[in-house]
Image: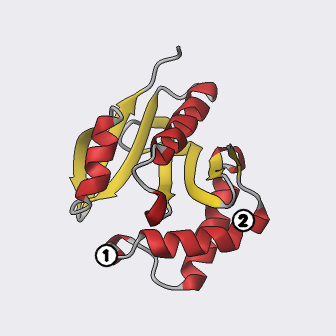
């Protein structure tokens, strides 16, 4: 089941985030305090677009911010700030379901572009995004910008 995140999901987010970024620390917040502050920031940015997948516990999170103004697109987009699935539950379609929920939300909010940033060496994530219709649209430092044009179905 996918549902909106609530304030009391903070600890599950922190634990899942820390596990998910093992080996990718160059792209992650490193202290529990930073991760907690990140959770609170995501919840304030667009509470309806901050979602989690759960089934007998939390499986993963996605944060889609439809209030985000892209300096590249020069308009509001569906910015995917975060997506992760707890490592032992990957490769089961959970990430794809979370991403679809985020994109559906962006379309519902009349956004026609989804945008995200991925670490240049995060090969697994890059393949996942490309498989889901994103394409590389630029680079800033160690980050690659990926975009997907959205259409109402």
Q: In this view, does 58 lie above or below 131?
A: below
| Extreme-top residue of the structure | 153
- Which residue corresponds to the image point at 44% horizontal and 36% vertical from the top-left? 114
- Where residue 68 appears, as percent x and y from the top left, is 54, 45
In the rendered image, the quadrant that contains the N terminus is top right
Mark 2 residue crowding within 10 angstroms, few (<14) / some (14–19) / many (20+): few
Which residue is at the front of the view, 101 or 114?
Answer: 101
- Which residue corresponds to the image point at 64% horizontal and 54% vertical from the top-left? 45
- Where residue 86 appears, as percent x and y from the top left, is 50, 63
- Which residue corresponds to the image point at 41% horizontal and 73% vertical from the top-left? 28
Q: Is residue 14 above or below residue 112?
A: below
Using the rendered view, name the quadrant where residue 2 is placed: top right
Q: Residue 9 carries which label?
A: 2
Q: Circle 2 sits in a helix, a strand or a loop, which is it? A: helix
- Which residue corresponds to the image point at 31% horizontal and 75% vertical from the top-left? 23
Side (left or right) of 17 relative to 10: left
Which color scheme is applied? secondary structure
Q: Disc 2 to disc 1, how far (Cα)?
A: 24 Å
What residue did someone put label 1 on? 23
Q: Is residue 32 above or below residue 57?
A: below
Side (left or right) of 18 relative to 131: right
Asked if residue 146 can be seen in this view, the reply is no
- Where residue 70 appears, as percent x and y from the top left, is 44, 43
Q: How many marks?
A: 2
Q: In this view, does 145 lie above or below 102?
A: below
């Amino acid at each position: 089941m996918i549902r909106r995140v609530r304030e009391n999901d903070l600890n599950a987010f922190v634990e899942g985030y820390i596990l998910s970024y093992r080996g990718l620390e160059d792209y992650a917040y490193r202290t529990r305090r930073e991760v907690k502050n990140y959770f609170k920031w995501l919840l304030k940015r667009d509470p309806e677009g901050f979602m989690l997948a759960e089934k007998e516990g939390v499986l993963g999170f996605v944060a889609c911010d439809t209030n985000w103004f892209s300096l590249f697109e020069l308009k509001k987009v569906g910015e995917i700030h975060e997506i992760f699935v707890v490592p032992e539950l990957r490769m089961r379609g959970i990430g794809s379901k979370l991403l679809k929920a985020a994109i559906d939300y962006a379309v519902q909010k009349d956004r026609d572009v989804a945008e995200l940033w991925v670490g240049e060496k995060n090969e697994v994530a890059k393949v996942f995004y490309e498989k889901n219709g994103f394409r590389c649209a630029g680079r800033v430092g160690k980050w690659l910008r990926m975009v997907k044009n959205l259409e109402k179905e």
